[in-house]
Image (tube, rainbow, N blue to C red):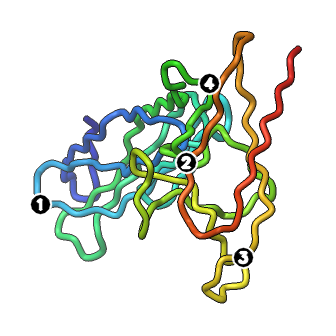
Amino acid sequence: LAALVGCGGVEVTISVDNVTMTECTTHEVTYTLAPTGLFANATLEVVSSTPEEIIEIDGMTLHALDDGTATVKLSVENMAGADKKFSGEKSFQVTIEPIELPEGEFILNGGFEYALGGWTLTPDLPYETTVTDNVPHSGESAFNLWYDGDADEMSDDLDLMMVQEAEQVPSGTYLFSLWYQGTADAVRKNLTHFMN
């Protein structure tokens, strides 16, 4: 809790919880003021992060870009015309954990539940993983092969390369498979295996 004292000596306390997130997820920051019934304008600011630039802020939403830790400052101020005047700040910790590899698999985020985390895409366009009209194979997300660059409400042809380097794969024989639904004529896969 942090005590906020404003003009006129009104004491207000603010509480905000530390946050634990997974890479490539979002989190809406909430806080409480006491006494109850107070309303505030609030902003967030990254004070420090290790490594740098692991988090992005959009209003009161945190976007986890990479794993690590960050200190975020919440600043609050009374709304314009409020009877009780106050302003102050409270810092909290954000821990961002890496995406976990499913047991028995070597492809990270194969179901796109963590947006495009783990994947490198060429060309780098604003692809979507949110499912609206179709049903995902499992989970709640899927990679959308629909891309309408010219905004004519028709999907453009895609010449897309999705790359992921699987680490610590023991020698052996493996099955690589993908699940696809749609009306495209063909989806090709090219699995390249490099051994060091």
| Vertical comparison of 103 with 148: above or below | above
Query: Residue at position x 57%, y 28% from top?
Result: 68
Front in this rendered view, residue 176 or 43? 176
Q: Position of residue 149 (x, y in %)?
A: 71, 77
Few, some or many residues within 10 Å of mark 2 (<14, 14–19, 20+): few
Question: For residue 187, what is the image quadrant?
Answer: bottom right
Mark with earlier residue (2, 1): 1
- The residues bearing labels 2 and 1 have C-alpha atoms spaced at a distance of 51 Å
- The residues bearing labels 4 and 3 have C-alpha atoms spaced at a distance of 31 Å
Quarter that holds the N terminus? top left
Q: In the displayed structure, does residue 120 sit left or right of residue 131? A: right
Q: Where is residue 158 in the image (x, y as percent from the top left)?
A: 76, 66
Q: Is mark 1 on a helix, strand or loop?
A: loop
Q: What residue type is labelled 1?
A: Gly
Residue assigned mark 1: 37
Residue assigned mark 3: 156
Q: What element carries label 3?
A: loop
The disc label shown at residue 179, or none: 2
Front in this rendered view, residue 70 or 22? 22
Question: For residue 18, what is the image quadrant?
Answer: top left
- The residues bearing labels 3 and 1 have C-alpha atoms spaced at a distance of 51 Å
